[in-house]
Image: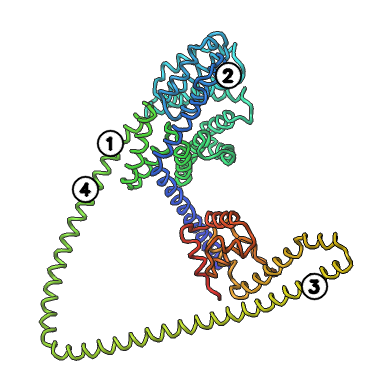
Amino acid sequence: MVKRKILWLLWACMTAGTACAQSATASLSSLYHTLDSLIERHDDIVAAKEAQIKSLVSGWRGMQLTPEQEYDMNLRLYDEYLAFRFDSAYAYIHRNMLSPLTQSDPDRRAVTAIRMAHILAVSGIFNNARLLLDSIPLAQVSNEARVAYYNQQAELNLYRSEMAQYTPYSIEYIDSAQYYRQLLLQVAPKESFEYVLNRAAYTCEQGGVEEAIRQLEPYLSGLQPGDRQYSIVASTLAYFYWKNNNLQQRERYLLLSAISDLRGAILENNALRELATILMERGEHEKAYRYLSRASNDAREYGSRLRSMQVARMSPLIAKAYDIERERAQQRTSRLLFAVTAIAVLLLCTIGYTLSLIKKRRKDNEKISRMNDELSRQNAELSELTSHLSLLTSEMKEANRIKDEYIGRFLELSSNLIHRGELRLKLFNRLARDHKLEDLYAELKSPKGINESIRIFHQNFDTAFLNIYPNFIEEVNRLMTDDNQFEVSSDSARLTTELRVLALIRLGISDNQKIAGILRSSLTTIYTYRSKLKSRAKSKETFEDDIRKIATY
């Protein structure tokens, strides 16, 4: 009994593990699909970013700006170009470097120098960036500038570590980055982005990888994909999971970072190149080559020598692997062609022998074949006739049921409206007879009677329609996206105005003017309803045709 329980538990664990693995694989596949679609739209996204910046610049053109306003404008444009165009970001921050405000204000000078150091560092000009940072008088600047200074020193050492990879200097640069992270954690506000990121990075490098993941992972959910901070945090989490030897999670966060880069037109990126490495190691050389090409083009468009050199290191490896795979494919093709040729020769011999046998029996088979053809034709005609008859019978039954339902409802509605008209006429006569002209005028002016008639009409229409199409709302929900479902109430026989529009379309009434007249609504309202319903459908192009195909049972 105990053994059986143990075996059952092992089987349950294996099943759960398999399910989790399949779910994770499906998630990665979905992310790759999103990434590929964004790569296809890369030029449009970049064009939209350029148009946004152009609009921002044109808003300031022709204005007489104060030195402070010009300084702030240059900072704003630097931020826009920061991860988009190296030369433009450099040009705007260089203007601030020459500004009199920068020369007279130590804090502005520090902020400007730190930004200039960043743009130099991502372009691989490390020495100039370090000299610029070392020139900042920390004792004279604000706490905020000091946080930015420590953050930039740590970042600079990380870039130098990347370029010194596989050398003893790489560890030295990592240690320097850790030193500046410690200083940053002492002065940075605990809720700031710099504090959260550097605390997790410091914890990871100190050996607490799982703790670093717990610190940083919840923070990502508060950021928006397409934002540079989201890309940085996702890429950092990928590095943490690589350190923790969880390669699947590493790949997932690299995908999230790359997707964010593409959505935000962030050309100074790293995740796409890392994904290319993973794909190459997995043998998906064609996809790896495509991603690396995109990363190389982004680095070239941005103007980053650092990223270009990193891509250049990988290009020969992927190109070689791609050529090897292509050569193997050619070899497989050659072997396959040889096999196909041998099979074709054997098949020709078989066909020749078979033809000789067929020739001997042709006379007998011709007669049997003609009889079989005639019998098949008659069976086909009979089957088609039976099918048409069955369809016609079904359509007649449905038409009769719809006719009976609507005739009954029409008679009941007509009788009800006539009765209400008689009651209202009697009321008018009584008021006229009693000379209560003001009451009579009030009754004539009141829309209450019309509104009540419309309500009764809608009630009868809804009841009749749902009797004929009892599953109409459920069928409509199958055509809508998950977040645009109509509520289905078991004790309700009422349709909303949107569902009545769809009901009339199902009954063959497609003209907006006719629908507006039946529902006592404006033509604009009906047009708006139809447009909104199409936009919420899974298949916008075939939505109304799908509505017309909803069956009565």
Which circle, 1 or 3, is nearer the viewer? 3
**Amino acid type shown at disc 3:** Leu
Residue occupied by mark 3? 423
Gap between marks 3 and 4 measured at Cα = 92 Å
Question: Element at badge 2?
Answer: helix
Which mark is on residue 145?
2
Looking at the image, which residue is at 47% across and 54% down? Answer: 21
**Amino acid type shown at disc 2:** Ala
Question: Element at badge 4?
Answer: helix
Residue occupied by mark 1? 316
Q: Which is nearer the N-term, disc 2 or disc 1?
A: 2
Colour theme: rainbow
Looking at the image, which residue is at 69% across and 75% down? Answer: 413
Q: Quadrant of the N terminus?
A: bottom right
**Amino acid type shown at disc 4:** Glu
Q: Nearer the viewer, residue 284 or 552?
A: 552
